[in-house]
Image: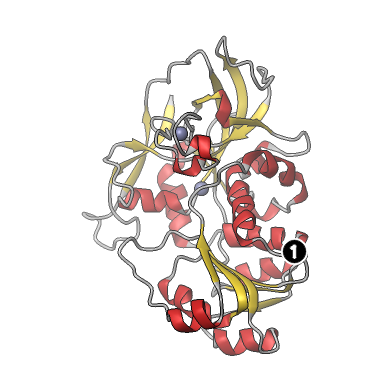
C-alpha cells in the first residue's frame, strides 16, 4: 500500500538541497490486524504543524519513517475482539494516533498523557490503510464529512486547551498564533463566552479568518506594539486568559506583561527544545498571581471533540487537498505558509 514517509531528515526549508529534508510516497506492506484492532481505509489525513518538525528530526525518528496522524476513514475490517464500542464495517471514523496502555501508574491516575507505554509506532496516517486498536477509534457524527473528520485530532487538542485554560464566561481572552490550532481555539473560545476575544498573528488572511470566526479584535505583532494594543483593548487590565500556540519565543516572552492580575497563561506550542524563557517571578507569580500552565497531548478529549465537530466551521480548513501520490508538493505547500491547512487524500473511500 502507498504511504508517505520521511526519507531524509532535515528542514524542508533548508536552502541547501543536500541538507534539506525529504518525503516520498513509498509502497509498504499492510499492517497485520490484531484481535482488538480495527482496519481503516484512510480517506484523508491532514498535515499537522508537527509533521515538518518530525521531518526535521526533533522527535529523534530515523528515516525512513511514516508520517501523519490527523486521519479520517471508513472501517473495512474488525478483529474478533474489537467489540467494546459497537463499531461496524462501513462506519466513518477518526481517532487518536496514540494508544494508551490503560494499566500503568499514569493511566490509572487520570493522566493517560504520561502513559509509560503509549504506542504510536508503525501507524502512519498518510497511508491507504491504517490499523488502530479499538480504543483509538471514534465514530464521526453523521453530519460531518470525511474531509472534516480528519480534523478530529486537532479539535481534541482544542478541548484539552479549554480543560487547562478554564476560561470563564465573560473573561477577556487572547490567542497568540493564528495557525489552524489558534483559529480553531478562537471558535471554541467564542462558544465559551470569551470577551475582547483577540488573535495576535502576523499573516493577514489568518487574522481575517479569526474575525469571521467571531474574534472581536486582531493584532498584527509584526506591525503593531502588542502590549499597547492589548492594554487598549482590555482597558489597562490585561487578558484573563491567554493561549500561546505560535511557538515563537519572542511572542511567548511578551505575554506575561499583558496577562491580567490573577489570570491564566497557557503555553501550548512546540517551542524549540533548548529555549529557556526569562520570567520575572516577583512580578508575575508573586505580585500578579498568574497561573502559568501548558499542554502536551489531548487526554480524555476525543469523545467531546467528536461532539464538537458539527458545531465548528471547518470549511476554511478543508479546501486544499493533495493526492497521496503528490507527497512532496503537499509538504512544499505546507511549509510555504500560504494555506491554512492541507489535506492529503489517501484513498477513494
Ligand atoms: Zn496534529
Ligand atoms: Zn499507560
Q: Which residue ends up furthest to the top in the rendered image?
A: 80
Q: Position of residue 26 (x, y in %)?
A: 36, 31
Is 59 placed above or below 76 here? below
Is 17 placed above or below 218 here? above
Asked which secondary structure carries label 1, the reply is: helix
93, 156: nearer the viewer:
156
Near mark 1 (Cα within 10 A), the count class, few <14, some 14-19 or many ≥20, is some
Is 28 placed above or below 298 here? above
For the point 37% across and 26% down, the residue is 27
Q: Which residue is mark 1?
A: 190
Q: Which residue ends up furthest to the left in the rendered image?
A: 18
Q: Position of residue 92 (x, y in %)?
A: 67, 28
**Which quadrant: the N terminus?**
top left
Q: Quadrant of residue 43?
A: top right
For the point 73% across and 46% down, the residue is 308
- 123 horizontally vs 273: left or right: right
**Which quadrant: the C terminus?**
top right
Q: Position of residue 141 (x, y in %)?
A: 75, 35
Q: Quadrant of residue 196?
A: bottom right
- 308 horizontally vs 109: left or right: right
Decide if residue 256 is in sight here: yes
Q: Position of residue 283 (x, y in %)?
A: 49, 84
Amino acid at each position: 500500500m502507498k504511504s508517505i514517509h520521511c526519507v531524509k531528515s532535515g528542514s524542508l526549508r533548508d536552502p541547501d538541497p543536500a541538507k534539506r529534508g525529504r518525503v516520498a510516497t513509498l509502497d509498504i506492506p499492510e499492517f497485520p490486524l490484531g484481535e482488538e484492532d480495527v482496519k481503516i481505509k484512510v480517506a484523508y489525513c491532514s498535515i499537522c504543524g508537527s509533521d515538518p518538525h518530525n521531518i526535521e528530526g526533533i522527535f529523534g525518528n530515523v528515516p525512513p519513517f511514516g508520517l501523519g496522524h490527523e486521519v479520517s476513514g471508513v472501517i473495512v475490517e474488525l478483529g474478533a475482539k474489537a467489540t467494546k464500542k459497537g463499531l461496524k464495517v462501513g462506519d466513518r471514523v477518526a481517532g487518536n494516533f496514540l494508544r494508551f496502555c490503560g494499566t500503568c501508574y499514569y493511566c490509572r491516575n487520570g493522566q493517560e498523557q504520561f502513559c509509560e507505554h503509549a504506542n504510536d509506532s508503525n501507524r502512519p496516517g498518510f497511508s491507504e490503510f491504517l490499523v488502530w486498536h479499538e480504543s483509538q477509534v471514534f465514530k464521526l457524527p453523521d453530519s460531518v464529512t470525511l474531509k472534516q473528520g480528519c480534523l478530529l485530532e486537532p479539535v481534541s487538542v482544542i478541548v484539552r486547551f479549554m480543560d487547562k485554560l478554564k476560561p470563564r464566561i465573560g473573561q477577556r481572552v487572547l490567542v497568540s498564533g493564528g495557525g489552524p490550532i489558534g483559529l480553531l481555539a478562537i471558535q471554541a473560545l467564542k462558544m465559551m463566552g470569551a470577551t475582547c476575544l483577540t488573535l495576535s498573528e502576523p499573516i493577514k488572511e489568518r487574522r481575517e479568518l479569526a474575525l469571521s470566526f467571531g474574534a472581536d479584535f486582531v493584532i498584527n505583532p509584526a506591525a503593531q506594539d502588542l502590549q499597547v494594543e492589548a492594554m487598549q483593548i482590555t482597558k489597562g487590565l490585561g487578558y484573563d486568559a491567554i493561549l500561546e500556540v505560535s511557538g515563537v519565543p519572542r511572542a511567548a516572552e511578551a505575554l506575561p506583561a499583558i496577562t491580567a492580575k490573577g489570570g491564566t497563561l497557557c503555553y501550548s506550542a512546540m517551542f524549540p527544545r533548548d529555549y529557556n524563557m526569562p520570567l520575572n517571578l516577583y512580578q508575575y507569580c508573586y505580585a500578579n498571581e498568574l497561573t502559568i500552565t501548558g499542554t502536551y497531548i489531548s487526554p480524555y478529549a476525543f469523545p467531546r471533540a467528536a461532539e464538537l465537530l458539527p458545531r465548528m466551521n471547518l470549511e476554511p480548513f478543508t479546501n486544499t487537498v493533495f493526492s497521496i501520490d503528490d507527497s512532496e508538493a503537499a509538504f512544499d505547500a505546507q511549509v510555504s505558509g500560504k494555506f491554512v491547512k492541507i489535506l492529503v487524500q489517501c484513498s477513494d473511500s
